[in-house]
């Protein structure tokens, strides 16, 4: 009976030891597997540049007369920075620092084109002028929810603007060594391209050929 008890104790101890080994192996696999998995991805944030000092959106949140929310402020939506002037460099520096601290690797700025110029680059320019700009890459999200470009000339001018003003920045975000541009609406791209006698794919190919 004593022998059986001792044998049982040894079996239980061996079982516990083996289970501990299994748990350690699983922990190692999960830990290093998660790290490897995470390192294979870049994490970016879409950035809407709608918050310069005279933005109507601030007026809406404050409930200012003449806004879309007159007399009804939304204090619970006030940012940690307060009602900041997005065009100022110190704001970009704070955004960059926070993003860098929490593992964000790039901002994809909403980018607009009116056929001749980009009317909402204030936040992006503040980023480029910031003292800590090298901590965070950037790229463009072409906000193509309009009929612009209305012709091939406007399209070429837009791509040339990208090349001359943004793709040459050392902190521009690349995918497989190529400058990345996100497109807000592929459907809108196809619809506008058809009006130009093109397809969305042919316009993208045209842009790629200019970048090379």
Image (tube, rainbow, N blue to C red):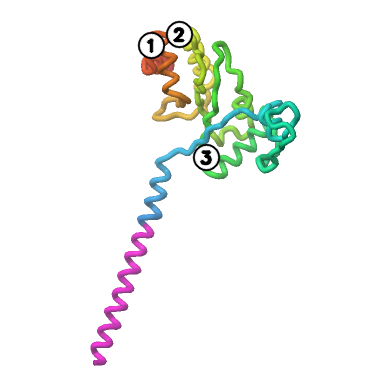
The residue identified by callout 1 is 198
104 with respect to 211 (left or right): right
Q: In the displayed structure, would residue 9 be above or below residue 114?
A: below
Question: In front: 129, or 61?
Answer: 61
Position in image of residue 149 (x %, y %): 49, 12
- Which of the pair 48/26 is nearer the observer? 48
Q: Can residue 212 be seen at all in this image of the molecule?
A: no
**Residue at image location 41% in from the left, 49% down from the top:** 35
Q: Residue 141 location in percent, x, y?
A: 50, 26
Q: Earlier in the sequence, mark 2 or mark 1?
A: 2
> Disc 3 designates what residue?
104
Q: Is residue 167 positioned above or below 85 on the image?
A: above
Q: Which residues are magenta?
A: 1-28
Reading the image, the residue beneath label 2 is 152
In reply to whether residue 7 is colored magenta, the answer given is: yes
Dot 3 surroundings within 10 Å: few (below 14), some, or many (20 or more)?
some
Labelled pair 2, 1 in contact (Cβ < 8 Å):
yes
Q: Nearer the viewer, mark 3 or mark 1?
A: 1
């Amino acid at each position: 009976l004593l022998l059986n008890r001792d044998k049982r104790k040894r079996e239980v101890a061996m079982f516990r030891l083996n289970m501990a080994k299994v748990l350690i192996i699983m922990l190692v696999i999960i830990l290093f597997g998660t790290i490897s998995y995470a390192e294979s991805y870049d994490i970016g944030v879409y950035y809407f540049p709608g918050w310069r000092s005279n933005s109507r959106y601030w007026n809406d949140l404050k409930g200012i007369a003449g806004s879309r929310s007159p007399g009804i402020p939304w204090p619970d939506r006030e940012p940690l920075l307060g009602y900041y002037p997005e065009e100022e460099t110190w704001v970009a520096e704070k955004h960059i620092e926070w993003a860098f601290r929490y593992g964000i690797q790039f901002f994809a700025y909403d980018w607009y084109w009116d056929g001749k110029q980009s009317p909402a680059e204030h936040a992006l320019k503040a980023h480029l002028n910031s003292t800590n700009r090298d901590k965070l890459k950037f790229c463009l999200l072409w906000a193509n929810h309009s009929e612009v470009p209305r012709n091939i000339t406007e399209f070429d001018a837009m791509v040339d603007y990208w090349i001359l003003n943004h793709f040459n920045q050392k902190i521009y975000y690349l995918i497989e060594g190529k400058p990345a541009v996100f497109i807000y609406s592929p459907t809108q791209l196809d619809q506008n391209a058809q009006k130009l006698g093109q397809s969305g794919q042919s316009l993208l190919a045209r842009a790629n050929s200019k970048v090379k």
